[in-house]
Structures are given as structure tokens and as C-alpha cells.
């Protein structure tokens, strides 16, 4: 598959207070992201019953947001307003609540405690309204839409009947091999039902040890394929290899090949279904994401990949025993995230082995000085790579881009950098990547 263009997007600027606030908003507004993923945000005229149900939910959310405004709970109220706007901006109370919240400063000191108590009162009302929406869309036979509303309902009140309906939806999605639905349902159910976490964990472990599991976070729409070693055991620590696919965006196939090359090694494979690896975000390549998500992040793709992978890696660490420091590789356009993570967060990288990788300058504006010369980096290219000298007819090719990153690493104080040109074409070099992992681990 061809690599992406040398400079598809401008490198992101250093994190600002506004950017940090946006990340906090991702956490508190996670439900809106989940709804967008499956394509349930309004895109045109809705059936009458559905339209009425959306207005009902939005009005309940607005009432809760208005209470938040009156009690100094700006963060919680703003999240509720955004959720309401995604349903019906014209619903009663939405505009008024939005204006009242805009007039507030920071959250009041006692806002968190008040919000916890108020959600116990408001949550059942919002959840019941979402139940009506689930019923309103049931007739259209589009499981992803009703699943999203069901998860939204669960997020406000995780009653036993709702958990039972979610379990039924999960069973149906598993039987139909709708992996995106399975991933999102498991993430949403686990968050809504912390007492049942071990049950959901067992499902994910079974899927990820027998083959590949599409992993979701409840707090960000990015999905990632994960493969656990067959003898995975709770309580043990495992090396983690984050491998990023190229422009073809064949994420599942890439992850499967990496897991096969892993063999009997006791290591975890993670392959993000990200955006920085390719040129156009073609819907056919991203069947797990709604077109609204692709559009929203097209001009700021690392804002999707970076925070999304942090959520995934947090799950890998806490739930599956993944090491805090990860190994990185990126093939072709996958080099963009690989180099970005390496340059911006070297303290959490055990080693990096980019394979025939693009380098587009991501991360240079937020590059810290690496400690002790940084982790080991092994740059690999192919002598027979058709993109060796040109990318889509334009220099620099893979060799020139690798020259640039090698020079930049040395300039920034990286001292454990090696480079090799192999007798290979444009190739992810899975076997060579695992040999590198072995060397770093001292095997």
C-alpha cells in the first residue's frame, strides 16, 4: 500500500489551557462521542416518534443543566447541554440553560458532591426518556442506533432491566459478528455497571486470547484491535507493542499479521484504528466510525489518535497488565503516530522500530529532551521499496524522510538510534520488529 503524503497536516501546537480543557470535555462529554460514533446525531428529518422522543430527552437534559447552572456545576451542566444539543437544539430549556452556564466561572467548590446527589434524582428521568427513544427507533431495524440510545440510557441509570436489555443486545451483536457494536456495548456496560466489571473482563479476555478483540473506551470514540498472548494470566505484567497500519487502513489484517509474527512471545499487540496513517478518510476504510466523526477530526487527526490511544493504553495497563512503557512501530503512514508518540512522550516508550515509515514532522513543537539519550530507536527501510525515493512522484521518499528523522533525533539528543536498509519492499517488517523487541528485552 502506498504511503501517505509527506506533510498531510500541520504538526499540532504545544498543549494549551484551552486544549487541556477540551480533553477534560472529552471525559465529561463522552456520551456525545459515543452517539456520534454510531451515526445517531441528527442528519436530517427524523420520523415523528423519534423526533418527539429526542425532544423529550433534550428537555430532561436541559432541566438538569439548568439545575447545574443554579448550583455552580458548570462542567456537568455544559456536558448535559452538549448532549441535549446533539438531540434537539430547539427543545424547551436548552438555550436558557446554555446561556446560564455560559455566565458562570469555574465550578463551585462543592459542585461535585451536589452533582452526585442530583444525578440520583435526575438520572432516572433522563434514562426513562432515552428508553422512549430506544422504542421509537426499534422499528427501523438498525441495531447500532438503538444500541447507542440504550447505552445513553444506561449512562444515566443502570437499572437491572436496562442492563438486561444491554446484555441481550451484546449477545445479538456477538452472534452477528458486529465487532464495533460488541466493543462499544462492552465499554458502556462496564462503565455503567462497575459491580459487573469482572464479567465483562472475562468476555474481553476470551475474545482477545482466542484471536483479536476490538477494544473501546467509554470516554473516546477511537477503537483499537488488541491481541493477548494465549497464556495470558491476571496479575502478570506484559510488554506492549503498539503497531500502526499504513495508508490502506487494513487495521484488522495488520493486527492479525503482527500477532502471528509474535508467535509464543508473552506480549500484547495493540493496533489503533486511527486517522493519521492515511490520506483521505474514506468511509469504506472506517466502517466502525460514523461519517460525522471522520468529518469532525479530518483537519486535526492527531487530536483523535493521541487522546484516543491514551484511553486505550490506560485500559491495556490497568485491565490487561500491559507495561507502562510501550514498544512502537509504524508502517508507511503509520509512522506519523509512531514518531509523534516517540517524540512527545519518550518516558513512556520502551523502544521504537518504524518500518518503511513516513515522517511528517508531528510532535516537533512539543518535543521534550529525552532522558539518558532516549529509548532505543531502530529505523528500518526497504532497499526495494517503490516509494524509496518518491512519494506519489514527489521527493522526499521513504529514505529521504528517514534521513530527516534520523538527523532530527540526533539533533534533539537521542543517542540510541540505529538504522538498517533491508532487502525488502514497502513492508511492515513484522518479524524484524519482534526481533528488535527481543533485543531490547535482552532475550
Image: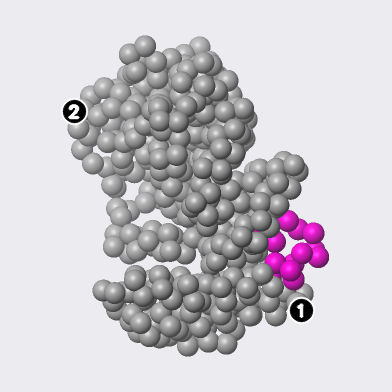
Residue 324, given in percent of the width and then of the height, sits at 34, 35
| Residue 421, quarter of picture | top left
Task: Indicate which disc, 1 or 2, sits on the residue closer to the N terminus.
Answer: 1
Residue 73, given in percent of the width and then of the height, sits at 36, 76
- Residue 428 appearing in the image: no
**Could you tell me which secondary element the residue under label 1 belongs to?**
helix
Point 80% across, 63% down: residue: 140
Q: Are marks 1 and 2 in contact (CB under 8 Å)?
A: no
Tell me: residue 436, above or below residue 186.
above
Nearer to us in this view, 419 or 132:
132
Q: Of the numbered discs in the image, which one, if any, rests on residue 349?
A: none
Tell me: residue 146, above or below residue 278.
below
Point 70% across, 67% down: residue: 134
| Residue 349, quarter of picture | top left
How would you rate the neighbour count of disc 1 (Cα within 10 Å): few for under 14, some for 14-19, many for 20 or more? few
412 in magenta = no
- Can you identify the residue that label 1 sits on? 48
Residue 48, given in percent of the width and then of the height, sits at 76, 79
**Residue range highlighted in magenta:** 133-147
Q: Looking at the figure, which quarter contains the C terminus?
A: top left
Farthest residue toward the left? 372
Tell which tag, 1 or 2, sits nearer the viewer: 1
Q: Looking at the figure, which quarter contains the N terminus?
A: top right
- Can you identify the residue that label 2 sits on? 372
Amino acid at each position: 500500500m502506498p504511503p501517505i503524503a509527506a506533510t498531510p497536516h500541520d504538526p499540532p501546537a504545544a498543549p494549551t489551557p484551552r486544549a487541556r480543557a477540551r480533553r477534560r470535555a472529552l471525559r465529561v462529554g463522552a456520551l456525545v462521542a459515543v452517539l456520534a460514533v454510531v451515526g445517531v446525531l441528527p442528519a436530517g428529518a427524523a420520523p415523528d416518534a423519534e423526533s418527539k422522543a429526542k425532544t423529550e430527552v433534550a428537555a430532561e437534559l436541559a432541566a438538569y443543566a439548568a439545575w447545574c447552572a443554579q448550583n455552580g456545576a458548570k462542567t456537568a451542566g455544559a456536558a448535559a447541554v452538549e448532549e441535549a444539543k446533539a438531540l434537539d437544539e430547539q427543545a424547551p430549556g436548552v438555550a436558557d440553560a446554555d446561556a446560564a452556564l455560559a455566565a458562570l466561572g469555574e465550578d463551585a467548590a462543592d459542585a461535585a458532591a451536589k452533582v452526585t446527589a442530583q444525578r440520583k434524582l435526575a438520572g432516572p428521568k433522563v434514562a426513562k426518556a432515552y428508553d422512549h427513544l430506544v422504542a421509537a427507533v426499534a422499528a427501523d431495524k438498525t441495531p447500532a442506533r438503538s444500541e447507542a440510545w440504550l447505552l445513553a440510557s444506561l449512562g444515566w441509570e443502570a437499572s437491572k432491566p436496562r442492563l438486561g436489555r444491554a446484555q441481550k443486545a451484546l449477545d445479538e451483536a456477538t452472534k452477528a459478528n458486529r465487532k464495533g457494536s460488541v466493543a462499544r456495548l462492552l465499554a458502556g456496560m462496564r462503565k455503567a455497571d462497575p459491580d459487573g466489571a469482572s464479567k465483562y473482563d472475562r468476555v474481553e479476555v476470551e475474545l482477545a486470547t482466542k484471536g483479536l478483540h476490538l477494544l473501546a473506551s467509554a470516554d473516546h470514540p477511537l477503537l483499537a484491535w488488541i491481541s493477548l498472548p494465549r497464556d495470558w494470566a491476571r496479575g502478570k505484567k506484559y510488554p506492549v507493542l503498539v503497531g500502526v497500519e499504513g495508508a490502506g487502513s487494513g487495521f484488522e489484517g495488520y493486527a492479525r499479521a503482527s500477532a502471528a509474527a509474535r508467535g509464543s512471545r508473552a506480549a500484547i499487540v495493540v493496533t489503533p484504528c486511527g486517522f493519521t496513517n492515511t490520506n483521505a478518510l474514506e468511509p469504506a476504510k472506517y466502517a466502525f466510525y460514523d461519517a460525522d466523526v471522520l468529518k469532525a477530526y479530518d483537519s486535526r487527526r492527531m487530536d483523535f489518535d493521541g487522546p484516543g490511544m491514551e484511553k486505550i493504553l490506560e485500559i491495556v495497563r490497568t485491565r490487561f497488565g500491559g507495561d507502562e512503557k510501550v514498544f512502537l512501530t509504524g508502517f508507511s503512514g503509520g509512522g506519523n503516530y509512531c514518531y509523534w508518540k516517540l517524540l512527545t512522550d519518550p518516558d513512556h516508550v520502551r523502544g521504537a522500530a518504524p518500518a518503511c515509515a513516513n515522517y511528517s514532522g508531528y510532535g516537533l513543537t512539543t518535543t521534550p529532551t529525552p532522558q539518558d539519550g532516549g529509548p532505543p530507536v531502530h529505523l528500518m527501510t526497504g532497499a526495494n521499496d517503490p516509494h524509496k525515493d518518491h512519494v506519489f512522484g514527489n521527493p522526499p521518499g521513504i529514505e529521504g524522510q528517514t534521513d530527516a528523522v534520523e538527523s532530527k533525533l540526533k539533533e534533539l539528543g537521542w543517542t540510541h538510534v540505529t538504522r538498517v536498509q533491508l532487502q525488502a519492499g514497502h513492508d511492515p517488517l513484522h518479524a524484524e520488529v519482534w526481533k528488535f523487541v527481543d533485543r531490547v528485552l535482552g532475550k
